[in-house]
Amino acid sequence: MIKRLGISIAGIAMLCAMSAVVHAADLTPLEQLGKNLFFDKNLSTPPGQSCAVCHAPETGFTGPDSAINAGQAIYPGAVHTRAGNRKPPTAAYGGDSPVLYFDEEEELWIGGMFWDGRATGWTLGDPLAEQALGPFLNNLEQNMPGAKQVVLKVSKSSYAALFEQVWGPGSLSYKSKADVAAAYEKIGRSIAAYERSAEVNPFTSKYDYYLKGQVELTAQELRGLQLFEGKAMCSACHLSQPGEHGEPPLFTDFTYDNLGIPKNPLNPFYHSPPSTNPDKANWVDPGLAGFLASAGYPEEVWMPELGKHKVPTLRNVDKRPHPGFVKSYGHNGFFKSLEEITHFYNTRDVAPWPPPEVPDNVNSDELGDLGLTAEEEADLVAFMKTLTDGFPLPQP
């Protein structure tokens, strides 16, 4: 079996767990500033594309459009004829992801942000803040022409005074390159503060209350938990038990894996112009390997990571605004329900699924032929649905 590193969850997670229901008034000034930036649709060219357009609270801070999720799964940017190459991951429960590093003992890359880890944290010491700054300048996403233009728009926003209250007078200056760089960094750190807040990470799921002894799981949910931590081997990557100091579990170990997911034939990136995607329909997503290669690592380092993507948290994996809402799953959104991706994990190697997009480095130790019955698959899904925030505690 592939070894997995159990990472202690500290600090931020404990603070988040202290609050069950959070309103904007409970945010610190820094967190409120980050929230204003997160929801500001003016920080794109043309205006209309905020962080929340692809990372909305009602779906657990991931894609909020049922029709897009049911189809191409990859979201268009501010210029609606352009789109990226992967579905939006959740922006919640990622604040404890460490600066990207290679663990020599475990022989695993750990940390960073984005599906491919390219927001390493090597520059700011904070992968979440680096990730927050990426979409603004990506022409496939918010399409701003440069950091100076982002700072300029923030300086003219309704919350500019709050920015200077938090970061000090003159913190939104754009008179020099150094001023712009400093202000732009503060924008990223502000958004990261909001994404670490208890409003985004409330730890209010049924499972959280079960761990505290405040509610009981149903018989089916308990069977699912037993499978999750046993026969189905989910907890090998999606850590489900509290940390060494009682920190609530984040259901990820921040590592990278190739699950053997097929290509998503509806991915709009295949139809991008040659300047963006010269390979057109032949493009293959290299995952972590693509970033490592672009960062100058030799082939012997990046080849073993080909096709690997970051292990996502399973918190809010089924959070939806209504029962008929479609969510997509996998880095490319190939799967259209929690039931479907669970069945894939169970039967990938023994059922007629399409071939993996990247056949190298496929994890065959922890999924593919789990031998679960249909009832056991349903039990697993029932348990994962207990990870949805906002569970109503019984009134005394």
Image (cartoon, rainbow, N blue to C red):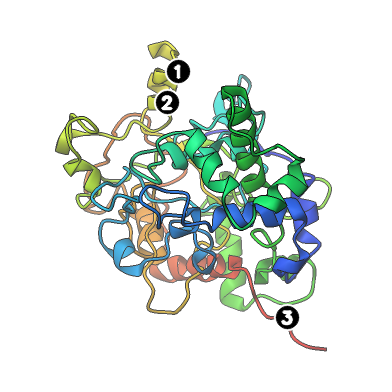
Residue 316 seen in this snapshot: yes
Of callouts 3 and 2, the N-terminal one: 2
Q: Please state which of the two labelled residues, at mark 3 or mark 2, is closer to the viewer.
A: 2
Residue position for label 1: 295
Q: Callout 2: few (<14), some (14-19), or many (20+) C-alpha neighbours within 10 Å?
A: some
- The residue singled out by tag 3 in the image is 393
In primary-sequence order, the first of circles 1 and 3 is 1
Whole-Å distance between the Cαs marked 1 and 3?
48 Å
- SS class, disc 1: loop
Instruction: Measure the C-alpha gap from mark 2 to mark 1.
Output: 6 Å
How far apart are labels 3 and 2 at the CA level?
A: 44 Å
Residue 184 lies, in percent from the top left, at 59, 35
Query: Could you tell me which residue is drawn at 40 percent across and 36 percent down?
Result: 145
> From the image, which quarter does the C terminus lie in?
bottom right
Mark 2 lies on residue: 291
Say which residue appears at 67% left-offset and 67% top-offset.
207
